[in-house]
Amino acid sequence: MKHDPLADAFAVLKNAESIGRKECVVPATKVVKGMLKVIREKGYIAGFDFVEDGKGGFFKVKLAGRINNCNVIRPRFSVTTGEMIKWEKKFLPGENIGLLLMTTPKGITDQKDALKLNTGGKLLGFIF
């Protein structure tokens, strides 16, 4: 714990959803903030707020009860627009179910928005 903040955030989200909590606390970093913005836009969480605690802060996440599974993808594989389907088949349970989160030159986004932007990137994680 505390070596990979993104992995810690995914673990906290997954565990809190599995036991039925309505809120959880995840570590605050720029990558975690970008990931939370994307999954909030797609409806997997209800919202999040930054709380400053004098040690870097944390995000208080309001859960929507829609997360079945989420995790980081390591190593951070490079993906081109032509390879998206291959990676969706590898990490997601079915077609049009879930998101592959990735970092692109245009910011953190999911695979569908990356295809619209016609850009590749590196895989961060998945959620469904």
Image (cartoon, grey):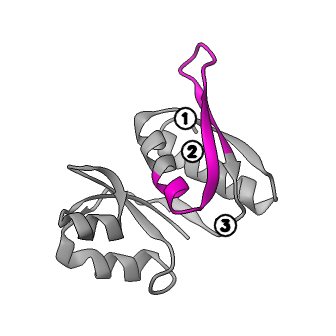
Residue at (44, 75) in percent of width and height: 91
In front here: 78 or 44? 44
Inspect the magenta stretch and tell me whether residue 58 lies in it. yes
**Residue corresponding to mark 1:** 2
Residue contact at pointers 3 and 2, CB within 8 angstroms: no
Q: Which residues are magenta?
A: 38-61
**Residue corresponding to mark 2:** 8
Disc 1 marks a residue whose amino acid type is Lys
Disc 2 marks a residue whose amino acid type is Asp
Q: CA distance from mark 3 to mark 2?
A: 19 Å
- As drawn, is 92 to the left or to the right of 107? right
Disc 3 marks a residue whose amino acid type is Arg
The picture quadrant where one finds residue 115 is: bottom left
**Residue corresponding to mark 3:** 66
Question: Residue 68, image x and y in percent?
Answer: 65, 70
| Quadrant occupied by the N terminus | top right
